[in-house]
Amino acid sequence: MESYQALKKYVHSPQMLNKLKEMGEVMVFEKNQVLLNERAYIHSIPIVISGTVKVMQSDSEMRELFLYYIQPGETCIMSFLGGLHNEQSKIKAIAETRCEVLLIPISSTSQLIRNFPEWVEYIFKIYHLRYEELLQVVNEVSFKKMDERILDFIRRRVQVSETNQLVVTHEELANELGTARVVVSRLLKQMEKEGLIKLGRNKITLL
């Protein structure tokens, strides 16, 4: 079942780790299952124990944009802040792979902050990590060409899934990058000609 080795990378106190286990509930989410929807109220803070969760945000036209991954041992800082202030979620969290998630009730966070300084340190570490990743997203959207963004995205997805083959449709890829499917299809074909990738039916192989 669940292993807490990844969390131990951030949480060094056995007392705090035991407290998190005591407070939380471990749930298993299958690939593509939604952990949290936009505009939903946040009742618990997710800490990923195994697997990977991707975080998205949509605009008024329901076009989605990929923001960052939550890897084992990490939490979603947006969920933490939203839950702390009793706000509706501004993001959507989806299981990128089958994953185990430790759900800590929002009502327990004040106790953690009061009794475990390491919890505050943990939150700041994750905040710093997410901040750097969001700056990268802004940089890519503002300054990089779409072909560069697509290739960077494929490389990140391949790294997360630990395989050189990505199972995704052109439309899904376009949605996650906030662009049109025809643009993605055209650029992927160009990348294939350049020998960077190989295209298959709903598959992209990084060469």
Image (spheres, grey):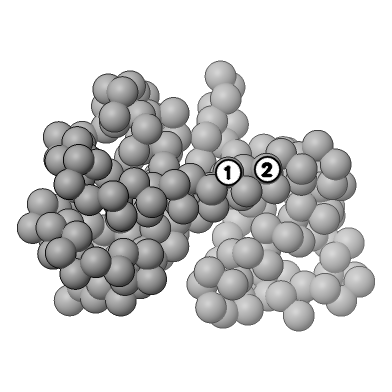
Tell me the number on the disc at residue 155: none
C-alpha gap between disc 1 and disc 2: 6 Å
Q: Amino acid at mark 2?
A: Leu
Dot 2 falls on a residue whose secondary structure is helix
The image position of residue 13, as x and y in percent, is 24, 66
Q: Nearer the viewer, residue 38 or 111?
A: 111
Q: Is residue 123 above or below residue 80?
A: below
Q: Is residue 53 visible?
A: no
Dot 1 falls on a residue whose secondary structure is helix
Q: Nearer the viewer, residue 46 or 155?
A: 46
Q: Nearer the viewer, residue 21 or 158?
A: 21
Q: Amino acid at mark 1?
A: Tyr
The residue carrying mark 2 is 135
The image position of residue 207, as x and y in percent, is 76, 80
- Answer left or right for 76 relative to 129: left
| Mark 1 burial class by Cα count in 10 Å: few <14, some 14-19, many 20+ | few
Kindly identify the residue that appears in the image at 83 percent across and 54 percent down: 147
Q: Nearer the viewer, residue 26 or 113?
A: 113
- Answer left or right for 58 relative to 36: right
Q: Is residue 45 visible?
A: yes
| Mark 2 burial class by Cα count in 10 Å: few <14, some 14-19, many 20+ | few
